[in-house]
Image (cartoon, rainbow, N blue to C red):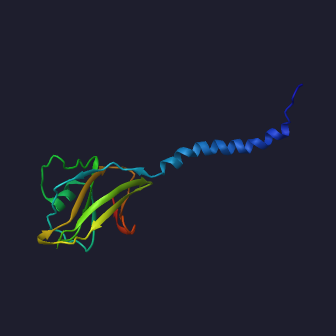
Amino acid sequence: MIYSANLSQIGTFKPMIRLIFIMFLLLPCVLKAQPQAVPVRFLQDYYYLGTAPLSDGVNAFVVTSRKEFKKLFGETKRPDTPDFSKEWMIVLLMPKTKWDAKIDIKDISMKAGSFIEVYTKVFDGIHKLTYDNYPIRVAVIPRYKNINNVNFYDGKRLRPLANVVVE
């Protein structure tokens, strides 16, 4: 038995084949916009100089140069100081307090499009201290050339804390 193809049926599949072809072409663009984990390196024993005034609550900084670093921490030759040509320093800082308050970074979460999201955890403290305390958390992330903003969020309430524009 010999089968013959009906040419009118083949023409109806051409738009579907074109649609599938276009979907495969756009797939890499869609995958690029998906959130990606950002590698993070936490730094210990950094102390704020206390020279610039701080607002109430959490103050967020993205340090991108040695000059900005000196304003917050002064001159240092520590081996863990970031290489600002390759890295950015994320600094979360609270005003001076007599309470055992702490700040933590829950997740330097995702790079999506032109921004990075940083989720924080703030502990206001329950014990009074005999000295002044500047709660601080410092982390280093890679420098991304297409990133324009770093958005900081309260990880518990998921409300925005700050938006830092990065050059």
Instruction: Report the residue at 73% width, 45% height from top.
Output: 15
Question: Is 63 placed above or below 3 here?
Answer: below
Task: Report the front residue among 8 and 40.
Answer: 40
Quadrant location, the N terminus:
top right
Quadrant location, the C terminus:
bottom left
Task: Report the front residue among 72 and 130.
Answer: 130
Question: Is 64 placed above or below 17 here?
Answer: below
Left of 56 or right of it: where is 113? right
Task: Report the front residue among 122 and 11.
Answer: 122
Left of 90 or right of it: where is 3? right
Q: Position of residue 96 (x, y in %)?
A: 17, 71
Q: Position of residue 43 (x, y in %)?
A: 21, 53
Left of 32 or right of it: where is 115? left
The image quadrant of residue 2 is: top right
Residue 167 visible = no
Residue 127 visible = yes
Task: Report the front residue among 99 and 15.
Answer: 99
Q: Position of residue 94 (x, y in %)?
A: 23, 68
Q: Position of residue 73 (x, y in %)?
A: 16, 59
Residue at the extreme top: 1
Instruction: Report the residue at 34% width, 55% height from top.
Output: 108
The image quadrant of residue 20 is: top right
Residue at the extreme front: 127
Instruction: Report the residue at 18% width, 61% height from top.
Output: 72
